[in-house]
Amino acid sequence: MQEQFSRAESGGAAPGAIIHEDTTVKWFVVSSISYFFIVGIIALIIAAKFVWPDLMGTTAWLTYGRLRPLHVNGMLFGWLLAADMGLTFYIVPRLCGVKIWSEKLGVATGVLWNVIILGAVVSLLLGRNKGFEYGELEMSLSVLVVVAWLMFTANILMTVFQRKYQAMYVSIWYFMGCLLWTAFVYLTGNFATLLATGVNQANLNWMYVHNAVGLIFTPVGLGIAYYFIPRTSNTPLFSHKLSMVGFWSLAFVYVWTGAHHMLHGPISQWLQTIAIAFSLMLLVPVWAVVYNLLITMKGQWHQLRDKVELKFLMSGVVFYLLTCFQGPMHSLRTVNAIVSKTDWIPGHAHMAVLGAFSFFAIAGTYYAAPRVFGKLLHSVALANWSYWMIMIGGLGFFTTLWLGGFWQGWQWNNVSIPFIDTVVALKPIWTVRFISGVMIFVGIVMFAYNIMATVLGPETEAAA
Amino acid sequence: MLRKADTSAVWAIVASLVLFFIGGLLTTVVPPMVDKSWGRPFANADPAKGPTGTLVRLNAQQQQGRDIYVREGCWYCHTQQIRTLLADTKRYGWKGVDAPISTPDEFVYDTPHMFGTKRTGPDLARVGGRYDTQWHRTHFRNPRDLVKGSIMPAFPWIVGNPQEFTALVAYMQTLGRAKDWRPSNDYER
């Protein structure tokens, strides 16, 4: 397996090596970092609104209720999924030892994706919101997402079918899993929900919300981590067998857990119990993956000093471990009674999507962007600064929201405290969250600027 | 067996879909067939069994109000569910009467559902009849005029549009009212 991995990766050295055009990768890299920056501004505004509620408060399209879905959809689909798709287009042909099946189809996918995101910005600001979490986009845009996803799926699967090496590295399974599961998960959350009402609809909605993270961002993110950790550290993966355990247990247990979003709520108790049981089982795929990736780095940790990609990747692995420990724990009824619906939840969600999966995507972009554009990274020092800004800002963001959320939950459970007092009590928390958000945003600007300066910078011969 | 998926893409695809669909179908398609209360509208005439009442569909005005509630994203900060927690029933009760726990049969006509995931503001599952129209007018114009320390946005463009404002309040006054839970019909209008 490792031999195949390094063979596929030996770049221009081997005779008759493939020259990858990577036009699709370029499209996705540039558009995803642009949205990371633009939507970062939206994120700052909504964090500021918690501290100064009258900020921009008399314009309909600048209110919290309009900007929040833009922040969520913009970050999930405009930045993270676009970056992940770009990296999939980068990795899969290299692991398969062939060119991408159709570069033209790939570019068309990238263009269509931009149309969708721009349409989302306009329609969400106008208040055209379907009313489902993560499923806000209006019907025409949801249909376009499905079309774009089918184009993406066809391209990647055809590349895999034409591969030169018979054995498939673990990243390829994760990418294929993501392609297939996403299709069904997205259809459930955006179309099947419309056929149901009430609790039945909510159950379909939570299946989508949970698996948007669990079966879209998790598999594609882990595929990226499984590729770039051995790649950037020049170290073979610790165990192929363990990666199988992680993948197939993920495939089986993740989808069962949607109802844990409604614990103590108006949904059948037995379904809540099933969701709790499977939420606990999530520890199996998570620990298998994390152990495998951590042990891969055994004796190689010193490399983190020099390689910014590894800093992001290994911090992402630790955040992944932490966020996926929180998940099963607050699916327990006793813990859930305290933290559910509090500010703990955005703390948890941000550690998954920003701390784990965006870290993987940032690392991949730092590695792939200079190579596909045939340039050297503009500034390694700036890249290190971006890491520390996002890391420290992120830690400030996560920890204050957990502490604040727990505190809020205790206050809610004491009914002698009026609700508004529990709001006022959290204002210091939201102030720290805003300051942490500014730090994260500065890190994002450094990252986006660094990549753009690389893209627009002078040609070099050092390209791999 | 899964070893085959190492070298065969078709095997990998089939196996990952089969594993996915087992859990997928059992947790989304099967539950509403097993628990019929998800689809049966609330109706109770016997006080011995708890609050009486009937779930009715929203009229055109209330539906317009609900559409505004969806459009403005109220549901990002307000949940609509009294959970099986003592604190929920006490906190959202009224004059010493506990709020009844939310049950699936109260939400049969809801689409999109508005259960919510985050309580930046209080739960609204039983807010119907809690405040009168004048209170809502002042509150939507600027929440901080009534509730010091509130961080809710002001909605002057709704208050300034009598038709939208009336519709939104009409919708809010229906919330939680399928169950007639307050003694002697003590609801604000």
Image (cartoon, rainbow, N blue to C red):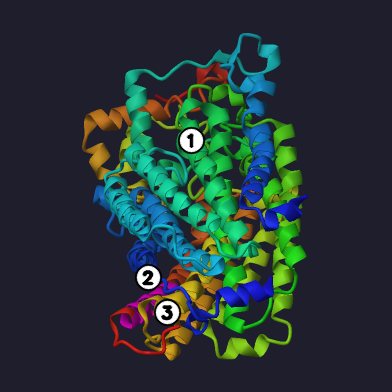
Q: Quadrant of the C terminus of chain A?
A: bottom left
Position of residue A332 relative to residue B61, above or below, is below
Position of residue B101 relative to residue A258, above or below, is above
| Residue ID at (53%, 22%) | B108
Q: Is residue A346 visible?
A: no
Pointer 1 with pointer 2, Cβ within 8 A: no
Observer-nearest residue: A327 or B51? A327
| Residue ID at (53%, 38%) | A205
Dot 2 lies on which element?
A: loop
Q: Which residue is mark 3?
A: A371
Amino acid residing under circle 1: Met
| Residue ID at (73%, 67%) | A240
| Residue ID at (56%, 35%) | A204
Dot 1 lies on which element?
A: loop
Q: Based on the displayed image, in which of its 4 quarters is residue A104 positioned?
A: bottom left
Chain of the residue under label 1: B
Q: Based on the displayed image, in which of its 4 quarters is residue A300 positioned?
A: bottom right
Q: Position of residue B112 (x, y in %)?
A: 45, 32
Q: Position of residue A22 (x, y in %)?
A: 39, 69
* CA–CA distance in space, label 3 to label 2: 11 Å
- Residue A446 painted magenta: yes
Chain of the residue under label 3: A
Q: Which residue is mark 1?
A: B114
Dot 3 lies on which element?
A: helix
Position of residue A356 relative to residue A374, above or below, is above
* CA–CA distance in space, label 1 to label 3: 47 Å
Q: Is residue B84 left or right of residue A353?
A: right
Amino acid residing under circle 3: Arg
